Amino acid sequence: MNNLKSQSYQVNRSDYEIRNKHRGLALWFTGLSGSGKSTLANVLHKKLFDEGMSSVVLDGDNTRLGINNDLTFSNKDRIENIRRVAEITKLFVQTGHVVITAFISPFKVNRTAAKEIISDNDFIEVFIDSSIEKCEERDVKGLYRKARSGEIKDFTGISSPYETPEKPDIHIQTNDFSISESTELLFKKLKAIL
C-alpha cells in the first residue's frame, strides 16, 4: 500500500456532471429477494436512458456471476460483496453516472460501510419493501422453496436475517404499487435530488 498513489485526471467529476446535465449519485436499492429491486432498477434505468441521463445498473446476480464469483453467501463474503460493489459504484458516481444498485444488502453495517465508501452526499438508500409472503409468490427462481427445504443455506429472510432500514431516504412499498407506479415515484424523487 505504501507504493500506491491516487491518480488525478484531466477530466474530473464536475466536467462529467456539466456534460451530463446532472450530478453523479448512487441509488442503493435494498430489500428481500423478490421484492422487485432488479425489476425496478431495470425499468428506472430505461427511463433515465430515455431522458438522456447517464446511468448504470449494478445487480446482485450479475456481479456474483462476474467480479464477485469467488464469494459465497456467508456473512464474511456478503460483507466483501457489498464492499466491492460500493467501490465500483463510487467510480461510476465520480464519472457523473446515476448508479442504481440492486442488492439485498441485508445488514445495516454493510449499508453503512457502503455509504462511507461512496459518501454521505452521494448515497441514497432506497428500501424496496415487500412482505416475505409476496416475495415468495413472485419467486420465479424457486429460491424460497429451496431455502425452506434446506437446500439453500444462509438465505435472507429464511435462515439469515434481513435488517430493515430504519430511515431510508426513499421507501417504496411494492406490495402496494405496480412497477410503473413505483418507477414514477422513484423518478420524481430522484429528479428532486438531482
Image: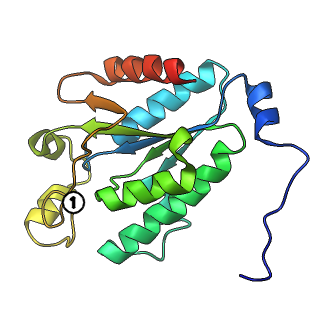
In the displayed structure, does residue 173 sit left or right of residue 110? left
- The kind of secondary structure element at disc 1 is loop
**Foreground of the two, 162 or 122:** 122
Q: Which residue is mark 1?
A: 156
Q: Nearer the viewer, residue 53 or 134?
A: 53
Image quadrant holding the C terminus, namely top right
Determine the residue positioned at 64% across, 43% down.
93
Q: Residues within 10 Å of mark 1 (few under 14, many from 20)?
A: many
Q: Image quadrant for the N terminus?
A: bottom right
Q: Nearer the viewer, residue 108 or 136?
A: 108
- Is residue 61 visible from the viewing direction of this image? no
Taking the spot 8% from the left edge, 68% from the top edge, the residue there is: 149
Residue drawn 52% across the image and 58% down it: 85
Residue 79 falls in which quadrant of the image? bottom left
Residue 178, relative to residue 5: is it above or below? above
**Residue 173 drawn at (x, y percent):** 23, 29
Whole-percent x, y for residue 103 in the image: 39, 51
Residue at position x 85%, y 56% from top? 8
Amino acid carrying mark 1 in the image:
Thr
* Res 77 visible: yes
